[in-house]
Image (spheres, helix red, strand yellow):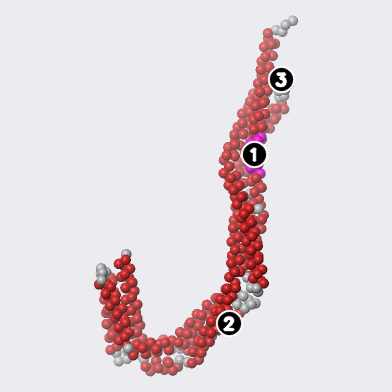
């Protein structure tokens, strides 16, 4: 007996639904493969970051990846659950086939969306991946440079030790360089890419500074020893001049000139003695600092500078009376020559002023200098002139006139 039309129609509907389910399941399988490939690619980038950097870039990428990955995993698990629920290779009933087709179509859309999210994630963080890759390429030569710099510093310190030179600061710098190199060698996974790169540069800088310090030591040693010899000679010369005494010179000053010419020199012998004692003390301290046992070069240089200052003060007190007497004798012997020198300087400024546009300020200054020049002549009318004041007054006029010449020329250039 032939089949009735109703069962044939029902079977056609079931077959169509089953075909649709199988087709949807096939597209879902392709979507799953695409999603899996996208996940694997993203995972490879994340794994690369995890193996080369523990810094902020890697942390930012991992944080952004977590929800994207979780969503993709959820989509895959849901698809696999429905794949196990409906076996489209068997003859499913109409309702089951229709439900399977609907579910698999939904999974196709969900997995395609998850794949798109992963693609967007990858596109968003591609610059970060590229940046880390390029930075990693820089890390290798920088690490090599840091290691070589430390080796060079170690070799330089070894040579200094062979020469008997103590390089305390260079040793401290090398210790710092070695500590930084440990950060470099720990790598970016433990310390972060940014910190490791910074440590590379700091390692090289500290090591190079250590080498520079070592290279300076022989010259520094020679400089200190030469200065010690020179200052010893200078000290002996000042001591000899001090021993000759200035009593006779002071007597001549007191007898021949007014008190204003020499009163500031009173007590010079005592002050010279104090300054010489200080110079001896500082020089001895510098010599001890520069000894083979100490080699404190900075302290030695500082001590030598203080020695020079003390010797300079001693020389002023020792030589001051003689220099003063020579000055006063020269000025009192020919006061007109000193005055003529000042007058020439003022006239030189006047000629320059009149040769161009006259600035009222410059003219007033010149008038003042001319008046002071006349007043200086009147100082000689006294019975006992203050030759020191006379000389200083005219010297000041000369200096101001020369300064005015410079000012006038500069104003005309502008």
Q: Nearer the viewer, mark 1 or mark 3?
A: 1
Asked if residue 218 is positioned above or below residue 135 in the image, the reply reads below
Q: Do residues under tags 3 and 2 come within 8 Å of each other at their CB atoms?
A: no
- Disc 3/disc 2 C-alpha distance (Å): 109 Å
Asked if the residue under mark 3 is in contact with the one under mark 1, i.e. CB atoms within 8 Å, the reply is no
Q: Is residue 360 magenta?
A: no
Quarter of the image containing the C terminus? bottom left
Q: Is residue 322 left or right of residue 217?
A: left
Give the magenta part as a residue range.
Answer: 36-47
Q: Residue at x 65, y 77 (%)?
A: 293
> Which of 57/293 is in front?
293
Residue 380 shows in this picture = yes
Residue, disc 1? 41
Residue assigned mark 3: 92
Gap in angstroms between the C-alphas marked 2 and 1: 75 Å
Q: In the rendered view, would you say 147 is above or below 32?
A: below
Q: Position of residue 171 (x, y in %)?
A: 64, 67
37 in magenta:
yes
Q: Going by the image, does 69 lie left or right of 258?
A: right
Helix, strand or loop at mark 1: helix
Mark 2 lies on a secondary structure that is: helix
> Residue at the location (58% across, 82% down)?
284
Label 2: how many residues lie within 10 Å, few (<14), some (14-19) or many (20+)?
some
Give the number of the disc on residue 284.
Answer: 2
Which callout, 3 or 2, points to the residue nearer the camera? Answer: 2
Coordinates of residue 267 in the picture (x, y in percent): 45, 88
């Amino acid at each position: 007996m032939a089949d009735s039309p109703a069962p044939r129609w029902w079977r056609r509907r079931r077959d169509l639904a089953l075909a649709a389910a199988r087709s949807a399941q096939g597209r879902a399988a392709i979507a799953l493969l695409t999603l899996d490939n996208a996940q694997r690619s993203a995972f490879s980038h994340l794994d690369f970051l995890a193996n080369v950097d523990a810094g902020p870039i890697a942390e930012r990428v991992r944080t952004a990846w977590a929800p994207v990955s979780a969503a993709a995993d959820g989509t895959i698990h849901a698809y696999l659950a429905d794949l196990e629920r409906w076996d489209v290779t068997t003859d499913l009933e109409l309702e089951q086939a229709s439900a399977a087709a609907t579910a698999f179509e939904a999974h196709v859309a969900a997995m395609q969306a998850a794949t798109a999210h992963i693609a967007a994630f990858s596109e968003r963080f591609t610059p970060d991946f590229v940046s880390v890759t390029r930075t990693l390429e820089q890390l290798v030569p920088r690490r090599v440079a840091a290691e070589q710099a430390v080796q060079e510093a170690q070799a330089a310190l070894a040579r200094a030790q062979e020469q008997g030179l103590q390089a305390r600061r260079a040793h401290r710098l090398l210790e710092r360089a070695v500590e930084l190199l440990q950060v470099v060698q720990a790598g970016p996974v433990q310390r972060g890419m940014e910190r490791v790169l910074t440590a590379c540069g700091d390692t090289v800088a500290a090591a190079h500074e250590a080498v520079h310090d070592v290279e300076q030591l022989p010259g520094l040693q020679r400089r200190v020893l030469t200065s010690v010899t020179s200052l010893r000679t200078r000290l002996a010369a000042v001591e000899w001049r001090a021993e000759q005494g200035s009593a006779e010179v002071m007597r001549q000053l007191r007898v021949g000139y007014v008190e204003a010419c020499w009163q500031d020199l009173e007590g010079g012998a005592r002050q010279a003695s104090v300054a010489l004692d200080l110079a001896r003390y500082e020089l001895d301290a510098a010599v001890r600092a520069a000894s083979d046992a100490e080699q404190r070069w900075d302290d030695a240089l500082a001590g030598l500078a203080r020695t020079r200052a003390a010797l300079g003060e001693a020389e002023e007190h020792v030589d001051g009376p003689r220099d003063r007497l020579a000055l006063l004798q020269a000025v009192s012997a020919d006061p007109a020559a000193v005055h003529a020198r000042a007058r020439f300087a003022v006239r030189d400024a006047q000629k320059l002023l009149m040769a161009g546009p006259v600035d009222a300020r410059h003219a007033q200054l010149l008038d003042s200098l001319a008046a002071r020049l006349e007043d200086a002549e009147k100082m000689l009318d006294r019975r006992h002139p203050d030759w020191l004041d006379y000389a200083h007054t005219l010297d000041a006029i000369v200096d101001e006139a020369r300064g005015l010449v410079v000012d006038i020329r500069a104003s005309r250039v502008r």
